[in-house]
Image: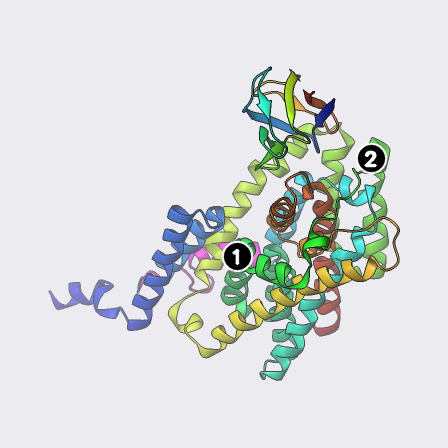
Amino acid sequence: MSEVTAPMAGKIIDVKVEVGDTVNEDDELLILEAMKMEMPLVASTSGRVKEIRCKKGDSVGADDILVVIE
Amino acid sequence: MLDMVLATGFIHLTLGNLVMWLIAFFFIYLAIRKSYEPLLLVPIGFGILIVNLPLTFLMEEGEGLLWRFYHYGLEWEVIPPLIFLGLGAMTDFGPMIANPKTLLLGAGAQFGVYVAFFGALFLGFSVPEACSIGIIGGADGPTTIYTTVHLAPHLLGATAIAAYSYMSLVPIIQPPIMRLLTTEKERKIVMKQLRPVSKREKILFPLVTVVVICLIVPASAPLMGMFMLGNLFKECGVVKRLSDAAANELMNIVTIVLGVSVGATMSAAHFLKLQVISVFIMGIVAFAFSTTAGILLAKFMNFFTKEKINPLIGSAGVSAVPMAARVSQLMGSKADPKNFLLMHAMGPNVAGVIGTVVAAGVFIALAG
């Protein structure tokens, strides 16, 4: 089990995967916007997306768990 | 009939005016098509255009509209401190408070200021002129303007344009230097998440900083005082209206007056000189040396610190906020997509603003 967390506070502007999707390490999962900069959040490991704890438009805080991969 | 023709601007147009029109249109084009610093380049470009229309006398001392903007806004030193008030209300010093070591990087990245200062002296500029040219290396527009108005007002158009041009070119100038001075392994250094900073720390920061810095360098007080007042507005949480006004309406109004006034100093007679080219060359030298010094200092600090610093955040010590921090983030994520340097780079970035203001204060005290 691996969790992808927010590296800093910001806004989720795109969710590129759905629960059940298979992903490889470094695949883009979400796009986080902070300080007018768009940053892709990538899968920390290969596996299946078990849970997505945010949606497009959400504001998230640093260290919030956003995606769970198993 | 002849009198009517003579009263129009057409026959008074000079070749220099036409060259300045081209420069004005180029700036406006860059702003609109390429989004290079549009908030400044649109008013600056327009200012250049209208001040180069003959017989308008917009910069006529005591009479012209733009002369009044320039005189009361810049010569009276009202506008740059007001810009700093707005910047303070927009700046989060949290990353710097969480990792005070980054203050050193912000100070180290002022190295280019001094390199350009000596370079300009070598090229035959006077000491006050060299100070105004050197400060371009801090990559801070309002501080450059403030220093130049104080020390070498005849260079204002050139230094202001150089500072703002290089700020907008940060994503082009810095990456090759960053690649050259760092190894792949260094670029992959992952930095520990910053600790949360309490509200109390954030409120105390501007109060302590203004007292300490203004005691050390009293000449920095107008900029530093307004910078920290704006930040106190933001962090104290009880004057949201003032904080919003400083960061939005007031900032926008003074930006308009600043931009047009800077453009207005660029009449053909004042701007089309060989000296101006030297200013631009020394400006980029300053900028490159500041970037280099920030990176090398970060590498040097790694010899002594347990928690390693990614040297890519060193280049963010130039005060182009937040462009330089964004470049650190981009370069870091290229080396490792799981590496997020943005907030780490904001530490040296905001420290760089303080560093440039201090450097300006020293210059003004010594050469003013």
Task: Residue A57: give x, y in percent of width and height.
Answer: 57, 21
User: What subunit carries mark 2?
Assistant: B
Residue that carries the numbered disc 1 in the rendered image? B172
User: From what the image shows, is residue B362 above or below residue B253?
Assistant: below
Q: In which quarter of the image is residue B359?
A: bottom right
Task: Residue B365: give x, y in percent of width and height.
Answer: 75, 68
Residue B50 showing in the rendered view: no
Task: Residue B277: give x, y in percent of width and height.
Answer: 48, 74
Residue that carries the numbered disc 2 in the rendered image? B197
B59 falls in the magenta region: yes
Task: Please provide the residue range marked out in magenta.
Answer: B55-75
Q: Residue A36 carries which label?
A: none
Q: What is the secondary structure assignment of the residue under circle 2?
A: loop
Residue at x 70% of width, y 59% of height: B356
| Nearest to the observer: residue B332 or residue B43 | B332
User: From what the image shows, is residue B228 above or below residue A28?
Assistant: below
B197 falls in the magenta region: no
Tell me which label, 2 or 1, sits earlier in the chain: 1
Q: How many angstroms separate mark 2 from mark 1 (CA)?
A: 33 Å
| Residue at the limit of the structure toward the left, as seen here | B1
| Nearest to the observer: residue A12 or residue A66 | A66
Q: Which amino acid does label 2 sit on?
A: Val
Residue at x 52% of width, y 76% of height: B278
Q: Which amino acid does label 1 sit on?
A: Ile
Residue at x 67% of width, y 73% of height: B115
